[in-house]
Amino acid sequence: MINWNELNFKPHEFACQYCPKNKNCNGHDDNIMDEKFIETLQEIRTSYGRSMVISSGYRCAAHPVEARKINRGGKPGSHYSGKAADIRCSGTEALTLLKVIMQYPKITGVGIQQTGLHSKRFIHVDTLEDYPRPNLWSY
């Protein structure tokens, strides 16, 4: 069980953003995120030495992004597993954070979105295993 009192993060930061619209979603459960993923994210946060804004954490199967994956015949993505988060950042902040992230072999997936509005830019990190896809990609 995650001890949120010892972390720089709070469970509401990872709550499914679609859940207020979906009464059947469990995305506001304090333990929906994978404990080892949160521990790794905290290690990154500590090394980074600055606050990190989580723009997307857990996503239920009904979340539009996850539902699209399922409707195309796939399975829900890394956010559904509780082993992923998108960290809002841009510019030199993103480069600095990426350098820190790449020091953590437990992070098996890194996606970079650094085009468009600065408020929509992020770095995706996850700890999925046995998931066929590249380890580093851009959106």
Image (cartoon, grey):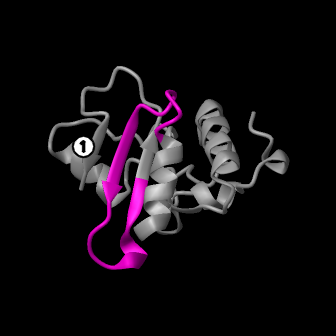
Identify whether 22 is placed above or below 30: below
Would you say residue 18 is visible in this rendering?
A: no
x then y, percent, for residue 106: 52, 28
Please report the bounds of the magenta region as a residue range: 102-123
Say what secondary structure mark 1 lies in.
helix
Give me the residue at 66% from left, 63% from top.
Answer: 51
The reply, left or right, for residue 32 in relation to residue 109 is right
Residue under numbered circle 1: 70
Judge whether residue 137 is colored magenta. no
> Residue 75: x, y in percent?
28, 35
Residue 109 part of the magenta segment? yes
Left or right relative to 136: residue 28: right
Residue 15 percent coordinates (x, y): 58, 57
- Name the residue: 50% across, 56% down: 96
Is 136 in front, or is 76?
136
- The correct choice, above or below, for 98 with respect to 40 in the image is below
Q: Which class describes the residues within 10 Å of circle 1: few (<14), some (14-19), or many (20+)?
A: some
Depth check, front residue: 106 or 93: 93
Quarter location, residue 118: bottom left
Q: Amino acid at mark 1?
A: Ile
- Whether 131 is drawn above or below 62: the answer is above
